Structures are given as structure tokens and as C-alpha cells.
Amino acid sequence: MIFRPPQSSGVPVYLQLIEQVKHAVETGALRVGDQLPTIRKVAGELVINPNTVARAYRELEHEGVLELRHGSGAFIKESAGGRARILRNAHSLVRSAIERLASLDLTDDELRRVLESELAQARTAPLQQGVAKGKA
Amino acid sequence: MTDFIIETNQLTKSFKGQPALRGLNLRVPRGSIFGFLGRNGAGKTTTIKTLMGLLRSDSGAARVFGVQVTDADRSIEVRRRIGFVTEDKELYPYMTVEQIIRFIRPLFPRWRHDLERRYLQMFDLPPKRKIPDLSKGMRSKLMLLLAISRGAELLILDEPTDGLDPAATEDVLRELVDMSASEGTTMFFSSHQLSEVEFIADHIGIIDLGKMVACGVLDEMKARYHRLQLVFEGSVELPPRWPDGVESVRQEGRVVSILVSHNVEAIVEQARSVPGTSVESFPVTLREIFLEHVRSNRDALVQRMVGNEV
């Protein structure tokens, strides 16, 4: 099973599905050329809106993870393998950062919060810079 | 351009001077599963009855398949294209399951025998049993069978899973999802069960006190809404005015929680401009969106009423 029932959260369901597929590619549960279940099948199994599944598939196609072949389904694309390698690199970068942070003796939750808040900061930062320039 | 199967414009309706609809605007796109959410007495059933031509609005307009619901000549043709499950699932008490199917079938030229057989089997309905002897869940499933088998392009479902146990609810929802995937049927269903709506609906409309208070694509709503948490190092000093998009501001000690419906970048920026604060942003669930709108709508109404009295 690639897909798990979605969680009731603020994260849109289609994004949860996208994460599940990407995760399956990273772990090797899905390999290049593998076929994903049809939209109707996924929607029926998880009891979720078919348009939501379709949207997840479309976005995954857009990101180069999936290839949608008209009438015959969705397949994991060659380029997804490359993406998986990049992600493995990212994993080793984060691993070494965690090793270096070990001396600070943070709890897992603290570490997670630091990461999330830095990520949020980094995402909104370009916008703030833009505004600052506008004022100058 | 999106094609709307249901469209209403400023619908109003009162019962004995008591307003039930206060200018309701509703648009249901073709092929969507539209979750129509509201508390008990918010105006859901009145809206549905108006759409089905069972009630006449006091003012405003409602169109289904582009036809005015008050257009008597064409509404019969339109109603053939709609499958309808009412809130009171009474049906005809003297008939058996088999009899009511035989009774309803000839009224609909596009009757789907394949779907009828399929749902009879899947829902495990006893053909010889009389309708009053069916459990509530079975009655709901029977109504759904009758609605689906007529080959409807639009299903209007008033609390379709009301009174069903979790397993039966799952069965019914799964069939609705499958109908949507295989036939592209548009579905408009009312519910106060947020948890079921959250996954099967792609569009959401929240009605409160006879008005739409929030409406749109569910995933887009979730992306637009944020809860910002501001933590103040010193004393809490909030800006006198917030940009458009702030739905509510709550304070507890040095922490201020802000629900944002849109325009989050500008609001985050304003929040960050307050000296000595840290700002964090959290995703918002459908439940929070629902409760917040229903609450703030009530507050606004109370304020208006108090204002009028002064």
C-alpha cells in the first residue's frame, strides 16, 4: 500500500498524497516504471474526492515524479530516481547538522521546532526584503 | 469559465417573519462534490427545498442546470436530472423495497438497471421487506439507490449519512466517491459532520444564519487560512488596525493568536513590525475554519442588532 488514509489537518489532502508518493520513491517502495493505482481506485479505497487524487497526480507529473499516459495510467518517471538521489544527499546533510547540534543537548521536539521556524522564516524572508527595498 | 450546476443569487426566505435565508449566494461547479456545512437551523434544508422547487423564496433567484427553479414548465425536465435524498427518509410506508423500485423506475427514462442491481446487492437490501421495517441505515441506502439509479447528473443529498453507523457511513461515502469518479456526477450534500466532508468534498460552503459565510475550494481555503501565534517579550502592544484578512484576534497573557483567512504575507509583516515579537504560523483545519466563521458571524449579528437598537 502506497497510500494511507489522509489525516484531518490543516494540510490539504492532495499535499498529503504527494508526500506519500515521494516518500515511497525515496524508500524504494516505488521504483522507476512502477504503475500507480487509478484515480478511481485510490479515491474509493481512501474514500476521498477523486478530483483531489487527480490533482495530486497532476502536481506529481508537473514535478517530474510521475508520467501520466492517457488512458493507461500513472507511472513513476525516470527523473524521479534523480530526485531520490538528491533527497538522499539532503538526508546526509541534515544528518551531519544533527550530529553537530548534539553538543547543545536539544530534545527532538525542540530541534523540530527550530527547523520549522527557520524554514518558515526563510520562506517569508524574500518578501520582507522586497518590502524593505521598497521603503528605501 | 466554470460551469455552475447550481447558482443562487441573494435568496431570502422567512417563515412567519423569522428569516431562514438572508441573501444566500451559492455556486456549485459541474463535477464537484460540494459539502454544504452549517449548524442545525442554519438554513441548509430551506436552501435544498428551494432548489428542488418545494419552497418558493421570498426574493432572489435560484437556477439549477441554468433553469429558474420557479419555471414550472421546465422544472420537471430538470428534476429528472436530479437525484434527491431528503432529510426525512420516510418514502411510502406501505411499499416493500422491490415495490418502490418498480414504482419509481418508469418515471425516469434514463433509469440505470445496472446501478440498481449493483446497489441492491452492495447495500444488501432485502427486496421483500416493507419500508417501515427497514433500519434507518437501510432506508438511507434505499433512498440513495433510488436517487443514483435514475441516472442523475446531480445528486442533492440532505444529510445523507445522518443516523448511520460508521461502517454504513463509510459504505455510502465510498459509493458517492465512486459515482463521482466513474460518472462525473455533481453532488451537493449538506452535513454537519465535518470529518466526513473534509475528505470527500472538494468544494465547501459554510452557511450560518441564512447566509454563506465562507465558500470555495477546500484545498485553497486550507492554503489561505493560517493561525499566527505572536509571542511578546515585553508588554503586548497590538497595532490599532490590521490589514484585511484578520478574522479574529485572541490574547492570552503574552501570546496572541490570530486567525487569518487571506492576505497572510501582509499580516505576518505587520505582526513582525511590532518590536519584540516572534511570529509563528500554523495550518488551520476545516473544523477551526468552520467554528471561527460560525462564531464571528454570530458576534457580528449581535453587534448589528445592538447597534440598531441604540
Image (cartoon, coloured by chain):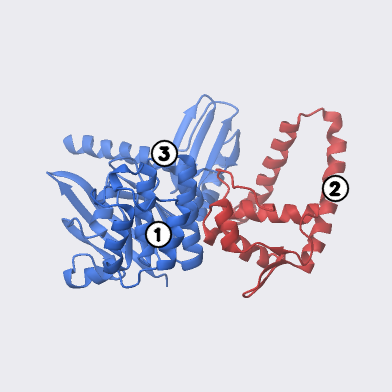
What is the three-letter code of the residue carrying label 3? Leu
Query: Under tag 2, what secondary structure?
Result: helix
The image quadrant where one finds the C terminus of chain A is bottom right
- Is there a contact, CB below 8 Å, between mark 2 and mark 3? no
Query: What's the colour of chain A in the image?
Result: red
Residue placed under numbered mark 3 in the picture: B291
Query: Under tag 3, what secondary structure?
Result: helix
Give B238 or A111, whichever is nearer the viewer. Answer: A111
Give A81 or B104, whichever is nearer the viewer. Answer: B104
Give the tally of numbered discs: 3
Query: Which residue is found at the position 15% from the left and 55% from the top?
Result: B58
In percent of width and height, residue B138 lies at 38, 46
Residue placed under numbered mark 1 in the picture: B187
Q: Nearer the viewer, mark 1 or mark 3?
A: 1
Q: As drawn, is A67 to the left or to the right of B199?
A: right
Do the residues indicated by labels 1 and 3 lie within the same chain of the protein? yes
Query: Under tag 1, what secondary structure?
Result: strand
Query: What's the colour of chain B in the image?
Result: blue
Give B89 or B66, whichever is nearer the viewer. Answer: B89
- Disc 2 from disc 1: Cα separation: 48 Å
Give whichever of discs 1 and 3 has the lower sequence position. 1
User: Is B32 placed above or below B39 here?
Assistant: below
- Disc 1 from disc 3: Cα separation: 24 Å
- The numbered disc on residue A103 is none
**Residue B165, picture quadrant:** top left
